Amino acid sequence: MKLRFRQLQAFHAIIQTGTVVGAAEMLGISQPGVSNLISQLEQQTGLKLFERMHGRLTATPEAAIIHRNVDAIVRGLHQVTQTVVDLQNKQTGNLQIASQHSMSFGAMPRIIGDFKKTYPDISISFQSQYSAKIQEWVEAGIFEIGICELPKLYDTLTYYLIQIPTKIVMHHENPLGKHQVLTPELLRDENFILMGRDHTTQTQLFQAFEQAGVKLKSSIHSHLFKNLLSFVKEDMGVALVDDFAIENDLDPRFISRYFTPKIYTDMAIITSNTRPLSQLANEFLQLLQQKLACYSPKSETKAPASPQNKPYKE
């Protein structure tokens, strides 16, 4: 039996992403191409490799055993390839970056754009995803650098902490717009649109209201800051979002105001501490840390950003 490496790559990518769509995006090929590779692999091995459960592809016990060896092969070849490219010419190579959603719409494209000006010939793979999945990807070696919200999930990752300021956003006709700074007392009659109580910002928000002796009212929950902002634009309530969620959004239907006590989104730039970064990733990491230095917990100047100001150091 002669297995093709491309088949093993498709097999590995499906196990990492859980879907044919995710595997196709990771490998840069079509979805039918991934399906054909898996079908060929199952025919050659005579084994059923995946079961569909709740909309995702789950590895069978046989596939889990095969994956142990395939994982080492795929990762090993990737590292060899990256090493050769780096040694040949630092101007070329592949940079893999993953970011949580709010930074994916403005800040990260700008920072990546700045880096691409210095290295115009490099290939960049950028993915926007939930924070838990980003930590999983970086820990697994699928992406070299990630930006995610806390909490920390892996001891095998290095976390460079940053704290992003938040604001209250509301419909532009809300009478509370006359205040430049809002408090729990001023917001006692407002309906909040929340990320979920386990989210770090919402935990802090509930604590602020409890300490003020004010009951926080809420009837809508979502999973993205951008979704919260969309509900606000429809005048369905107020929301607490981080600065990156509202930067460059010039929609006149909403306004933002400061909130006291101050609340920050606890985030981190993450890398693996079990495998070395490529030279390219090392240089991007330095640029990323420089651009986001004002958000370090050790920074003395945490100037809050506004939609008119780029929320990172130029």
Image: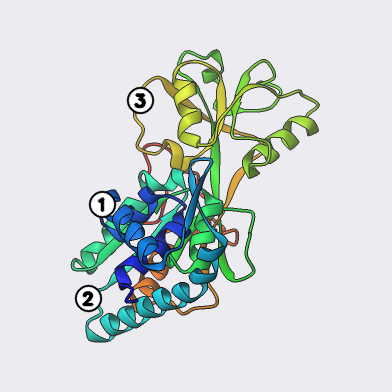
* Mark 2 vs 1, N-terminal side: 1
Q: Secondary structure at mark 1?
A: loop
* Mark 3 vs 1, N-terminal side: 1
Q: Which residue is mark 3?
A: 251
Extreme residue in the front direction? 46
From this view, report whether residue 145 is shown above or below residue 235.
Answer: below
Q: Residue 314 sits in which quadrant?
A: bottom left
From this view, report whether residue 219 is shown above or below residue 262.
Answer: above
Camera sees residue 149 = yes
Q: Using the image, tell me which numbered label, if any, was put on residue 30.
A: 1
Q: Is disc 3 surrounded by few (<14), some (14 to 19) or many (20+) residues within 10 Å?
A: few
Extreme residue in the left direction? 121
Q: Residue 38 sits in which quadrant?
A: bottom left
Q: Nearer the viewer, residue 290 or 20?
A: 20
Q: Is disc 2 surrounded by few (<14), some (14 to 19) or many (20+) residues within 10 Å?
A: some
Going by the numbered disc 2, the residue's amino acid type is: Gln
Camera sees residue 290 = no
Q: Nearer the viewer, residue 183 or 161?
A: 161
Going by the numbered disc 3, the residue's amino acid type is: Asp
